[in-house]
Amino acid sequence: MEKTVLITGASAGIGKATAVYLAQNGYNVYGAARRIEKMEDLKGYGIKPISLDVTSEESLAKCVAQILGEAGSIDILVNNAGSGYYGALEDMAILDAKYQMEVNVFGLARLIQLVLPSMRKNNFGKIVNISSVGGKVTLPMGGWYHASKFAIEGLSDALRKEVKSFGIDVIVIEPGGTKSEMVGLGTDYMMKVSGGTAYGKLAKGVSKMYAKIEKDAAEPIVIAKLIKEGIEAKNPKTRYAGAAGAKMMLFFRKILSDKQFDKMVMSQMN
């Protein structure tokens, strides 16, 4: 039986690539994003674009109700929508930090709340939360971004234990360097808020490092394939990591002490 998938942040990057890849592999796909005009081309793959602002309760409820009304179930939820503001903690406006947490954590959590009743009723569900290698390792200037991704990791671990008995799996995806418009937007914001402050030199170093990461970044299809692997596994792993530098960074984080890891990261800032 055809499974229905809801993918947030489907207007670009990982979300768009995953929507196309799953549609090509026989899934009934709803691609959701604020920029619905950016998803017009998805219709050619049989994907149904749906307007969604994950910071709006009304938009979230309307999106889920529409899919349940049309398809009868949401079998797989891919929480991919995300915000990536960078900047020194001292420099970043708390309002911007709150927005980032709203998109990356609270919007994700509310959408899970809305899909769980039907998943429990069907005794089946896959909840895929897109975290990041940045949910395990940190770089300077990424305090609020990392806080949101660390939160996704913890929330997913707790949720996994809560819903297991209902036949629902919770899967965390940890991408490394992946081609995305978010990195460019995030570093532009960082230079705006921290480029001319006491943290200016460090901001320039981080910006250079991200430019290097972007150069080696993997195509989003790499992550789309990981997501498919996770949702089709009978007994999925709790975490899947992939794309440029992901496994290497996680390996070094595991074997090095905090201070050793800090030293390694900061050596890349020159």
Image (tube, rainbow, N blue to C red):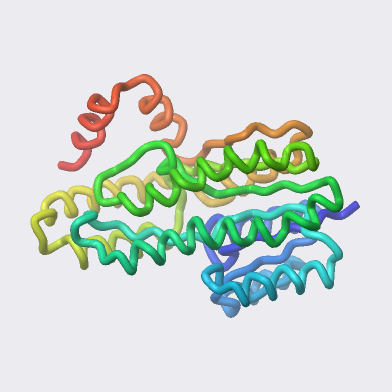
Could you tell me which residue is drawn at 11 percent across and 64 percent down?
Answer: 196
Q: Is residue 197 left or right of residue 233?
A: left
161 and 129: which one is in front?
161
Query: Residue 176's quadrant in the figure?
Result: top left
Residue 211 picture location, percent across and down:
29, 51
Q: Residue furthest left?
A: 198
| 29 is higher (above) or lower (below) than 201 | below
Query: Residue 63's quadrant in the figure?
Result: bottom right
Residue 130 picture location, percent across and down:
55, 49
Q: Is residue 74 left or right of residue 9?
A: right
11 and 67: which one is in front?
67
Q: Residue furthest bottom?
A: 37
| 53 is higher (above) or lower (below) than 162 | below
Could you tell me which residue is drawn at 20 percent across and 30 percent down?
Answer: 263
Q: Residue furthest front?
A: 162
Residue 133 picture location, percent across and down:
44, 40
Query: Residue 4's quadrant in the figure?
Result: bottom right
Res 218 visible = no
Q: Is residue 128 left or right of residue 208?
A: right
Residue 185 picture location, percent across and down:
35, 65
Could you tell me which residue is drawn at 10 percent across and 61 percent down?
Answer: 197
Could you tell me which residue is drawn at 75 percent across and 71 percent down?
Answer: 65
143 and 188: which one is in front?
143
| 264 is higher (above) or lower (below) than 97 | above
In which quadrant of the rendered image does the C terminus lie?
top left
